[in-house]
Amino acid sequence: MLQKIRIFVSWLIFSIMLLYFAGLAVPALPRWQLLPSLLAANVAVIAAIFIVTILFGRAYCSMLCPLGIMQDFFYWLAKRRKKGRHNAVHIPENRRVRYGVLAAVLLSLILGISPVVTALDPYSIFGRIVTDLLTVPVSYIWNGLAGLTETHGGPVLLTKTDILPRAGVTLALATAYLLVLFILAWRRGRWYCNTVCPVGTLLGTVSRHSLYRPVIRQEDCVHCRLCERNCRSSCIDIDHGTVDTSRCVDCFDCVSICPKGAISFARPRKDRTASGTESTVPQEGEMTRREMLLTTAAAVGTAAAALARRQPIIPALLGSKRRGRPILPPGAVGADAFMLQCTGCHLCVSRCPSGVLQPAVMQNGIFQMGQPFMDFAKGYCVYNCNFCSQACPAGAIRPLALAAKQKTRIGVAQYAQFHCLITQKGIVCGNCARHCPTHAISMVENKDGRSYPQVDASRCIGCGSCEYHCPADPPAIAVTILRKKAGA
């Protein structure tokens, strides 16, 4: 029964998450992802996740993490195809790798080395796979279906969507993620979740002490090893009758597959010792006092560093106040905070209707690799849209009401007359003025009798519509970052 509930809930959540990235549902569940919640200081969500973990173990990893659910699907495929897959066996926990990775994430949060967090956060990896790899083929299928409805002359049920191919590097990275995870899940089940994933290690530290866990009753066990061979976490040791609850992801397969009912999800029983005192039945993964202190310090430190969101050290040392800083979407507090809090999940990219938000490769430097940037050659910030601010689960883009977003200035348009078609070819196009949603650009007649664009900086919000619609190459009008006045 527990297994069936887990499967139903996990696939329901996975389907809803896909709808979020397709823009067909309001993104609420991404705010329940652990690392984005830590970065957004969402205390209620963090408390709920840790309370569930201390009660029932890593239920988050089995039912709420979309990347974990995706790996479960790959593991299920491997089990269906018996050839090419060896039966799982018990593998001891690799604490050095687990807590080494967690310590690296802690250090990166303190120093502001965003690519480390971006590369390892499971929710963000899932988002990049879906957005960068699957969006384009799905868009072609969608447009094909829309074309069929138009061809047959019936009511238009589907409207075509613009197809914006991703950069080769982002496409290659998403493909590499998918292939690596597929191979690991096919051969080792949840190996990534239990050895590399910092969220899995963080929750695993808590779940070592969970109240309810898989318990093996030695008197009923016949050592058939069905549970051990089917454990996707390789955390069941039948020889010693133990389960490593720090790696168990609450799939409940062992409970349902045991032919003798020797495994149950319950509180560990207490046996009486010769002296008459009670002692809990030992479980695998128990640590020495020194190990417990070190791992707890790494876990607590990582969570505290994510919550603190301090000024990143390394970008400050390298001069983050330099010119050429990126233009940020409306709702972003500042360049440093955006860089530190954004996990590169690309949910904002997938929901941007014009495609102005694109995954960065090296456009804004190595510290913002994988994070979104505004590419006005691909699109512009739509005046009647605030999707990105409503979607961001990590607080890198703060929620803005539509009226507030329409007044938020993210940059200012600068006109370069030499590049304009009026100067180059004598053509008066007026596209920039025609497409400006705030009427900050007007065509003003010059002494030579021609009309040239003129920008009213006080009304310009930097949406980039003028730059996107400018037919000149390079554009004669472009959005630049706002400069703070001296003494401001």
Image (cartoon, rainbow, N blue to C red):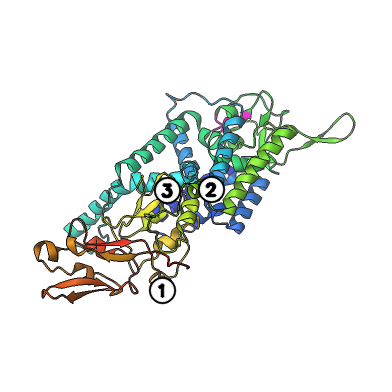
**Residue carrying label 2:** 313
Query: Marks 1/3: CA distance?
Result: 29 Å
Inspect the image, locate mark 1, and give the three-letter code of the amino acid beneath it: Ala
Report x, y in % for residue 26. Answer: 44, 61
Inspect the image, locate mark 2, and give the three-letter code of the amino acid beneath it: Ile
Nearer to me, 423 or 160: 423
Which of the numbered marks, if any, corresponds to residue 357?
none
Report x, y in % for residue 459. Answer: 33, 74
Magenta highlight range: 230-236
**How many numbered markers are drawn?**
3
Inspect the image, locate mark 3, and give the three-letter code of the amino acid beneath it: Gln
- Determine the main secondary structure of the stretch shown in magenta: loop
Q: Secondary structure at mark 3?
A: helix
Q: Are marks 1 and 3 in contact (CB under 8 Å)?
A: no
Q: State the quadrant of the N terminus.
A: top right
**Residue carrying label 1:** 403
Say which of marks 1 and 3 sits in front: 3
Q: Mark 1 or mark 2, which has the lower sequence index?
A: 2
Left or right, 357 with respect to 118, comes to left
Magenta stretch: includes residue 185: no
Q: Secondary structure at mark 2?
A: helix
Label 2: few (<14), some or many (≥20) within 10 Å?
Answer: some
Query: Marks 3/2: CA distance?
Result: 15 Å
Q: Mark 3 or mark 2, which has the lower sequence index?
A: 2
Rendered residue at 39%/52% (across/down): 372
